[in-house]
Image: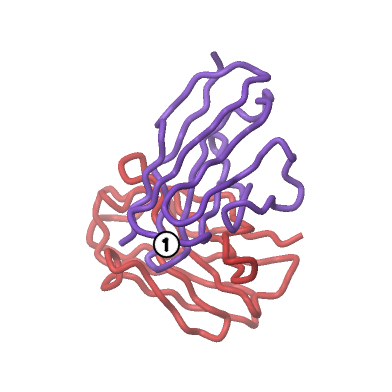
């Protein structure tokens, strides 16, 4: 069974960079897309972006200029960096596996990690 | 961006009731529609993919239908463990987008 686990600081100061890592266990990171999704009371579920195991990426235009997603296949990990954060970036951040088979869906998720942006 | 609109935003129902949740896309998304269940403090869990296919391990009381712009999630006989929030999500085009959610509460 594939498992995902987010890790990173739970508190980030405004204007700084949010950094999270997702560790994948129970399966290979190869041949799948790996996504970041966040959930805040004000905006519901919002897809942030994905990275393919080969390194190609795609991100939400609403965040594109601030988002960087990277992958380390040797560690079975992928990471999110979101720059210039504000209070609006306070949310629960999830990592998830996107399987392109069967028309595509998020079939495995991490438990989520709350990130609060505050000074 | 493709907008996903769910209705109702919340509903109250009793154990054993048949429950239907609607999801409408702002443009045709063919069958590229997934449904997720989320319980408080937990991550969303995939129920239905490709508009009507049941994810492995999901009870058959859950079903999905629709194509194009209009979709439906049906719970044939509501069970106590089904009280949760439900979200539709399109993956027809990026940015992938979610509906705002439907909260199913106990009557």
Q: Element type at marker 1?
A: loop
Q: Is residue B79 above or below residue B6?
A: above
Q: Quick one: which residue is furthest to the bottom in this view?
A: A54
- Where residue B81 sits: x, y (%)? 67, 28
| Image mark 1: chain | B
Note whether B61 is above or below A117 in the view shown: above
Q: Residue at x 63, y 30 (%)?
A: B82
Percent from the top left, x then y, of residue A73?
A: 62, 81
B101 sits left or right of A25 in the view? left
Q: At 54% from the left edge and 53% from the top edge, which residue is drawn?
A: B34
As drawn, B106 above or below A79: above
- Pinpoint residue A100: horizontal percent, then vertical percent: 59, 71
Residue B52 lies left or right of residue B27; in this view the side is: right
Q: Nearer the viewer, residue B60 or A50?
A: B60
Which residue is rendered at x = 41% and y = 53% of the image? B69
Classify 10 Å Cα crowding around label 1: few (below 14), some (14-19), many (20 and above): some
Q: Quick check: A79 left or right of A83?
A: right
> Where is mark 1, residue-wise?
B96
Which chain has been coloured red in this picture? A
Residue depicted at x 57% and y 28%:
B19
- Please tell me which residue lies in front, B69 or B101: B69
Question: Where does the image place residue A82, in percent across and percent down from the top left?
Answer: 34, 66
Above-or-below relation of B71 to A15: above
The chain whose colour is purple is: B
Image quadrant in which the N terminus of chain A is located: bottom right
């Amino acid at each position: 069974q594939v498992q995902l686990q987010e890790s990173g600081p739970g508190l980030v100061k405004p204007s700084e960079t949010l950094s999270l890592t997702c560790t994948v266990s129970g399966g290979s990171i190869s041949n799948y897309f790996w996504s970041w999704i966040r959930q805040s009371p004000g905006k519901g579920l919002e897809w942030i972006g994905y990275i393919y195991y080969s390194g190609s990426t795609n991100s939400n235009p609403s965040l594109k200029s601030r988002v960087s997603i990277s992958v380390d296949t040797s560690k079975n990990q992928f990471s999110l960096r979101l720059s210039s954060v504000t209070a609006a970036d306070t949310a629960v951040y999830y990592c998830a596996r996107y399987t392109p088979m069967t028309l595509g869906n998020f079939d495995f998720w991490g438990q989520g990690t709350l990130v609060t942006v505050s000074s | 961006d493709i907008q996903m609109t769910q209705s109702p935003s919340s509903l109250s129902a009793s154990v054993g009731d048949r429950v239907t949740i609607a999801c409408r896309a702002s443009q045709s998304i063919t069958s590229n529609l997934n449904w997720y269940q989320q319980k408080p403090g937990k991550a969303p869990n995939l129920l239905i993919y490709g508009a009507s296919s049941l994810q492995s391990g999901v009870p058959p009381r859950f079903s999905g239908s629709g194509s194009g712009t209009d979709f439906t999630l049906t719970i044939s006989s509501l069970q106590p463990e089904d009280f949760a929030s439900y979200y539709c999500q399109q993956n027809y085009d990026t940015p992938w987008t979610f509906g705002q959610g439907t909260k199913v509460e106990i009557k």
